Image (cartoon, grey):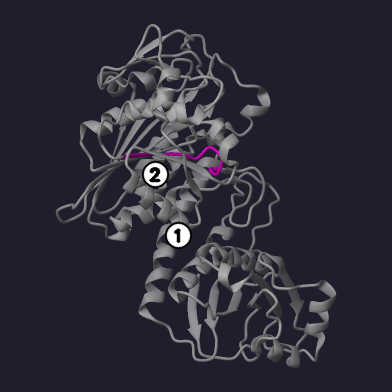
Amino acid sequence: METRFRDIGVEAIRAELLVVPVQEKKLEDAPLRALDRRLRGKLSERIQKSKFTGAEGSALLYPASGLLPSSHLLLLGMGSADDIESDVWRKAGARARREAAGVGAADIALFFAPGGSPEQAAAAIVEGMLLASYQFNKYRSNSKVSEAVKNLTFFRPGLMRTPAMEKSIAMVQRIMPGVYLARDLINEPPSVTTARFLGEQARRHCRGLGLSVEVWGKQKITAMKLNGLLAVNRGSQEEPRFIKIHYRPSGKPRKKVALIGKGITFDSGGLSLKPSKSMETMKLDMSGGAAVIGAMSLLPHLGLDIEVTGYIPTTDNLPGANAQKPGDVIRYLNGKTIEVLNTDAEGRLILADALALAAQQKPDTMINLATLTGACMVALGSEVGGLFSNNQPLADQLLRCARDTGEKLWQLPLVKEYRELIKSSVADMKNIGGSHGGAITAALILQEFVGDIPWAHLDIAGPAFAESDTALCNKGGTGFGVRTVLKFLSTL
C-alpha cells in the first residue's frame, strides 16, 4: 500500500473513497460544511436521519453521486477529542478498510487533522488498515477476495509530509508481514501445522543477515534432557521438535533477550481429555510459538543492536497408547521435578524446558508467550492478556509497549502464598493448583525455571484467537504479541 500526503481541500480531493474523521458533536466543522455545500444539503439531511453524532466507532457511508470528485464519502465517528488516542485511529483505519472493501475501493483519501502526534496517528491508521486487510481464504472454494488498498492519501490544506511520519509509517509496514505470518500459522488446520511443519516454517521465514535456525529432532531433544517436551509428546505419532532461532546484529550487541513461545500444535488434553466442544479451536495452542516466529522473522529488517534468541518447544498433546499419565513425574534440566496430575495442563510442562534452557545462557531479559490458561480468560476476558513478572520495571515497559500497539495487557500478581497450592507430596511441585487462581499458579510454576533473570510471562489465551470478527481481525488467529514484542525490543 502506497501512502501519500497532499496539500488540498476536502471538496477537491479525488479518490474512490473519501474518509473524514468526525469528533463527537462537531458536525459544524469546516470540512463537513464544505462537503454539504457540494452535496446540496443532502449530507446534513442524511446525518440527521441516521442520527450520526460522531460517537466513537460509528460511521456513515454516503454516495457522492457525481457531486464530488470522489466516488464515496465515509464519515468516521472518533468520539470526544480528549479520548482520541492511537487505538482510536487504529480502529478508524480498520473501519475505513472494511468500508472500502464493501464498495470495491482500492484508492482511499483521508482528511488528516489529528489533535495530538501526527506521527502516531498516521502510523496507527496505516496499521489498522493493514491489520484489517488480512485474509485467510486458502481452504475456501468460492471465497471472494477483497481487493487490496493500493493507495492511501493523507490530505488537508497545508499538510506537509515529515520525515517522522515517513519513518513511523515505514516501521508499521515493515512489521506487518510478521503479524500475517503468525496469523497464517495459527489458522492452518492442525493436520498441517505439526511440529515438523512449524520447524520448516521457522527455517523458511527466519532467514537473513544475522539470523540462524536450529530445529532439533527427538534424538537431540533427548540428549538435551528436555523431558517435559518428551513427556507431552508420548501420546503422539508425530515426533516433537525444539526450534531455536538466533539473531545476532552485525555489531556488538548491547543486550541479550530470550523469547519463548508455547508450541502445542493441537491440544486434546491428553488422557485428561477435553470435551469435544473445547477442542474445536485447539489449533490455536501454538499461538505463542507463532508470535515468536513472526517476531524473529523481522529482526534483520529492523536494525536492532540486541541479540535475541527464540525458543519454541512444539508437539501436539494426544491420548495415544503411550501417553503420559496422571501421577507421572518429570525431572527437568535444572534438577527440579514436576508431578503431572492433569495432562491437560501441558503447556507449562514444555515451557519449563525452554525456560530452563534459556536461563542457562543468562540473557538480560526473558519473555514467554503462551495460550496457557482458561483461568486467565475467566479473569480478563477474550481481548486482554495477562502479564506476570518478577521484575516491575520490565512489566511497566511491556505495559507501555502494549498500550502503544493497542494489544491489551493487564498485570496480575505472582502471589507467593499460592506456592502452597502447587506443592507435591512426591515431587518439587505438581502441575496444577487448587480450584481458583489457575493463571497465577501456572505462572508460579514457570517462575521456578527462570532463576533471578528479569522475566515476564504473557498469558495470551484470550486475545490470541478471535472467536468472531473484530475491528482489526477476522475470526481466527490474531498474531497477538508480535507487535508488542517488537515494540519492546525497539525500546531497549
Q: Which of marks 2 and 1 is in front?
A: 1
Q: Residue at x 45, y 26 (%)?
A: 441
Q: Type of residue at label 2? A: Ile
Q: Which residue is drawn at 75% across and 87% down?
A: 66
In 3D space, how far apart are the residues under numbered discs 2 and 1 (Cα atoms)? 22 Å
The residue carrying mark 2 is 293
- Is residue 215 visible in this depiction of the protein? yes
Quadrant of residue 250 within the rendered picture: bottom left
Number of other residues with Cα within 10 Å of mark 2, as a class: few under 14, some 14 to 19, many 20 or more: many
Q: Residue 461: x percent and y percent? A: 53, 37
- Is residue 315 visible in this depiction of the protein? no
Q: Nearer the viewer, residue 380 or 459?
A: 380
Q: Does the magenta stretch include residue 460?
A: yes
Q: Which residue is drawn at 32% across and 31% down?
A: 355
Q: Residue 302: x percent and y percent? A: 31, 60
Q: Is residue 51 magenta?
A: no
**Extreme residue in the right direction:** 49
Number of other residues with Cα within 10 Å of mark 1, as a class: few under 14, some 14 to 19, many 20 or more: some
Q: Is mark 2 on a helix, strand or loop?
A: helix
Q: Type of residue at label 1? A: Asp
Q: Nearer the viewer, residue 212 or 409?
A: 409
The residue carrying mark 1 is 404
Q: Please provide the residue range marked out in magenta.
A: 455-464
Q: Is mark 1 on a helix, strand or loop?
A: helix
**363 above or below 195?**
below
